[in-house]
Amino acid sequence: MIADTPAPPYYAVIFSNIRTEIEEGYAATSLEMLRLAETQKGYLGHESVREQLGITISYWESLDAIRNWKQQTDHLLAQRMGQKKWYSAYKTRICLVERDYGFEK
Amino acid sequence: MIADTPAPPYYAVIFSNIRTEIEEGYAATSLEMLRLAETQKGYLGHESVREQLGITISYWESLDAIRNWKQQTDHLLAQRMGQKKWYSAYKTRICLVERDYGFEK
């Protein structure tokens, strides 16, 4: 649930998004993209939650790893379908995680 | 819904959390903390979503603004109550947002 990331520094991609009402292909492609991301070099983990607003954060070792993932062929296709069909708005933020701390009962 | 942040660089605090079953005081304090954060110097916006996992991201102008917010008196009290009662686990990540891009229909 909470991604088990290594000690900083590492990178986070925050993908904040609002869906359209079009369901066709969305769930299957989302799942496929998460599975595919997991196989990418430099992938560290992800966290994903949706109410009206959806937030998916993926964690990466480097900017290179993020660039490679953004340019991955199936992912490019999914991004195009995302703009065309599934999202009415989104914002992607590329972040350097400088520090983290946590708590567990 | 999607925070209307200025051009990077700016900071993001990703707060990923799992709740306990204790509801007492949680909703009121959460709302109070969001309202209070909005009055802090350097606050830029926030996004918050919960399923089982909760993700709240607040955006800030600088590390100083984040430090001041972390040390704010009522917020310190809420953090203590959070560990004692409301959260079974959380992770906070302090991030420099280096780049962002978006899409809107």
Image: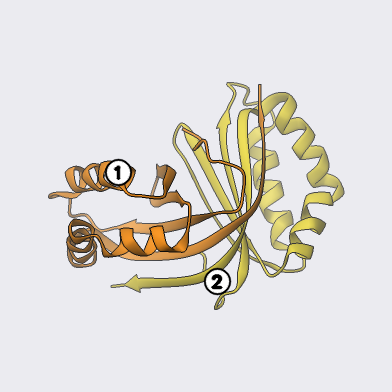
Chain colours: A orange, B yellow
Q: Secondary structure at mark 1?
A: helix
The residue singled out by tag 1 in the image is: A39
Image point (69%, 61%), residue name:
B38
Tell me the amino acid under the disc marked 1: Thr
User: Could you say where residue A26 lies in the image, as x and y percent from the top left?
Assistant: 19, 49
The residue singled out by tag 2 in the image is: B5
Tell me the amino acid under the disc marked 2: Thr
Image point (48%, 52%), residue name:
A61
In the foreground, A97 or B89: A97
Q: Secondary structure at mark 2?
A: loop
In the foreground, A103 or A8: A8
Residues at marks 2 and 1 touching, judged by CB atoms closer than 8 Å: no
The disc numbered 2 marks a residue on which chain?
B
- Depth check, mark 2 against mark 1: the one in front is 1
User: Could you say where residue A85 lies in the image, as x and y percent from the top left?
Assistant: 18, 62
Q: Residue furthest left?
A: A24
User: Could you say where residue A1 lies in the image, as x and y percent from the top left?
Assistant: 46, 32
User: Could you say where residue B2 lies in the image, as x and y percent from the top left?
Assistant: 46, 62
| Dot 2 crowding, Cα within 10 Å, few <14, some 14–19, many 20+ | some
In the foreground, B22 or A12: A12
Instruction: Determine whether, in the image, residue B29 is placed left or right of residue B8.
Output: right
